[in-house]
Image (cartoon, rainbow, N blue to C red):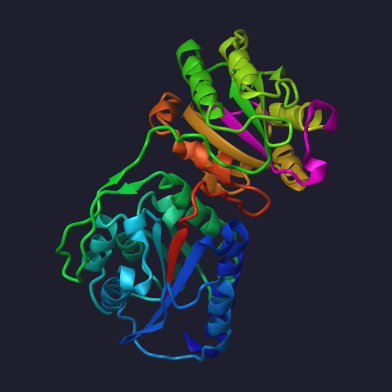
Amino acid sequence: MGKQNFEHVRNFLISAIRALHQVGGDKFRFALVRYNSRPKTEFKLNTYPSPQGALSHIRAMSYDGGGTRTGFGLDFLIRAHMNSASGSRAADGVTQMVVVLTDGRSQDDVTEPAHVLHLAEVEVFAVGVQDALDSELRDLASKPYNTHVFSVESFLSLKDIVQDLVVGLCGAVAQNRYASVVSEDPVTGGGTGKMGRVTLFSFLSALVVGPRDIIFLLDSTMGGTLFNASREFIRRYVNTLPIDPSTVQVGVAQFSTDARVEIDLNTHGSRDALAAALGRLRLRTGQQTVNIGAALDFVRTNMLTPDKGSRFRQGVPQLVLLMTSKRSSDSVDEAARALQEMGVLTVAVGTKAASEDELKRIAFTESVVHMLKDFRMLLRKPTIVTDGLSTLSGTVVIEEPTETGNSLVLFY
């Protein structure tokens, strides 16, 4: 990659670790493996008790050239790092994550060691630069690919994906927050050995999340069945949150051609009162076209205001979840831009005739756009959406309900 590009990689590693430290404090542990023709351990998960040690180590590293044997490097990582002696806390149920950074096609096979990591429930993120093959990045990465695969045209552009990568990493932590490892045996490079079995709960028990204001913006043309499913999804999610004026506040609006407030952020100050109000929520029938742009403007000017309970002036994260089944009949760009300039984090879920491209322009980042068959899927897989609502803020915030923490291997 050359010395100049190595500096861009160094800055990328430092930025990612700093962001994760800001998110989770000392609950994240880091290891670093460098590979060319031969892999080399820079430090293990238990080498440095705090991120400051890892950052100092990275700043002091010198450039090493060589080939690209990604498969050999992954095999080395599995044998030398993914065990308790090297600091892995997989046996304690701690999420294990690997970020692979590569700038070219591997000179050996990556599928077998990647498969070993996938079977062991390790979350693998693949970052490709310049000549990296998209097909190989997908072989390396866990699913879904839209949150686990990143491609940039130059090493300088690595700085542009730090936030999306951190969103993905924190989403993986949130997804596995209540995972329990039933059994664990050493994982070998050949892919033998028993893998820990992971059980995920359908709905999370009460989350320990920081203060945030969340607006649910519902398309009222979706029909009664899907509206009832959406309402039940919101009700179940609310029952996991600490609802009060100092922590989490929730508002709801419906829209078609026009928007209407159903619940303001400061209407209900307790979980029970909010859940009861959601139970009384009814679909507003009438128009069958949707003006999403106007609805977003309505939320910004009528709901995200101090008199309606918004705490944006106090720096409390502001989130809007847009749920729509159709393409907008009006322009969405200016309304979406106004929310972004206000610092609002908009998450978008679409079904049926909704436009994915339009939702990507609305959302604050493409990784929080979700296209579903219909909204009933959220009752079966709520974490598709709730991970982001519970963990995102200005950059990314995640509050863990346990003291176990998270393990991350940065590998390039």
Considering every residue shown, the one lying at the far front of the view is: 403
Q: Position of residue 167 (x, y in %)?
A: 54, 53
Highlighted range, magenta: 306-330
372 in the magenta segment:
no
State the residue at coordinates (63%, 40%). 346
Q: Position of residue 169 (x, y in %)?
A: 48, 56
The quarter of the picture where residue 277 lies is: top right
- Determine whether, in the image, residue 122 is placed left or right of residue 220: left
Q: How many marks?
A: 0
* Residue 380 visible in the snapshot: yes
State the residue at coordinates (62%, 10%). 284
* Residue 5 visible in the snapshot: no
Q: Nearer the viewer, residue 42 or 246?
A: 246
- Determine whether, in the image, residue 46 is placed left or right of residue 72: right
Q: Nearer the viewer, residue 325 or 99?
A: 99
319 in the magenta segment:
yes
State the residue at coordinates (66%, 38%). 319
Considering every residue shown, the one lying at the far right of the view is: 307
The quadrant in which the C terminus is found is: bottom left
- Determine whether, in the image, residue 225 is placed left or right of residue 162: left
Q: Is residue 152 above or below residue 295?
A: below
Q: Is residue 134 above or below residue 31?
A: above
- Determine whether, in the image, residue 61 is placed left or right of residue 182: right
Q: Is residue 184 above or below residue 312?
A: below
